[in-house]
Amino acid sequence: MSSMPTLTVRDATRADAEACAAVYAPYVTDTAITFEYEPPTAGQMADRIAAAQERHAWIVLRDAEGVAGYAYGGPFRPRDAYRWTCEVSVYLQTGRRRTGAGRTLYQALLPRLAERGMHTAIACMSLPNDASLGLHRSLGFEDVGVMRKAGRKFDAWHDIAWVQLDLSAHAGRS
């Protein structure tokens, strides 16, 4: 009889940077899911984690083998009027998509962001990306627009979809 692996979610620290960078690197090198061209180093990832933790949040999903994925919120835009809106992302180890891991991460992340004063969460996805669109829609994110040919990677133009979620329903849930 097999059992499901135990998954835990916790706030990330700088010590998680190497594992998060390893999760993220294949998205950078092998997909247009992110528009970065070079994977960040562990040091750069540590700085990103620390910056997210200052006002927003960065969490990791762990199993018996270590970090299986992460999610974070960060600033949407730098102008003062946007300070209650954050941009969110989730990244999972290869093979973990459509397993419930992304949902688990977001269900822990969204209340943290609401408790830290965020009112609206925004997510941006390069298209096509049915798995990410499905995840966000299942969590109540609403489609708000598509920008055509907004990014270029691997010698091709890519559209991006924007979705948003009112976080007021998530306050007090963590």
Image: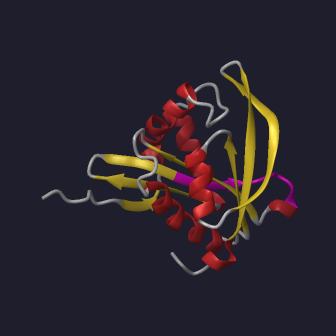
Q: Residue 31's quadrant in the figure?
A: top right
Q: Is residue 166 visible?
A: yes
- The tally of labels here is 0
- Magenta highlight range: 71-80
Tell me where residue 65 appears, x and y as whole percent: 28, 46
Q: Residue at x 76, y 62 (%)?
A: 85
Tell me where residue 161 appears, x and y as whole percent: 73, 47
Q: Residue at x 58, y 49 (%)?
A: 132
Q: Is residue 14 magenta?
A: no
Q: Residue at x 26, y 56 (%)?
A: 5
Q: Is residue 15 above or below residue 87?
A: above
Left or right of residue 59: residue 61: left
Tell me where residue 15 appears, x and y as whole percent: 42, 46
Q: Residue 129's quadrant in the figure?
A: top right
Tell me where residue 78 appears, x and y as whole percent: 82, 52
Query: In this figure, which colouring scheme has been used for the structure?
Result: secondary structure
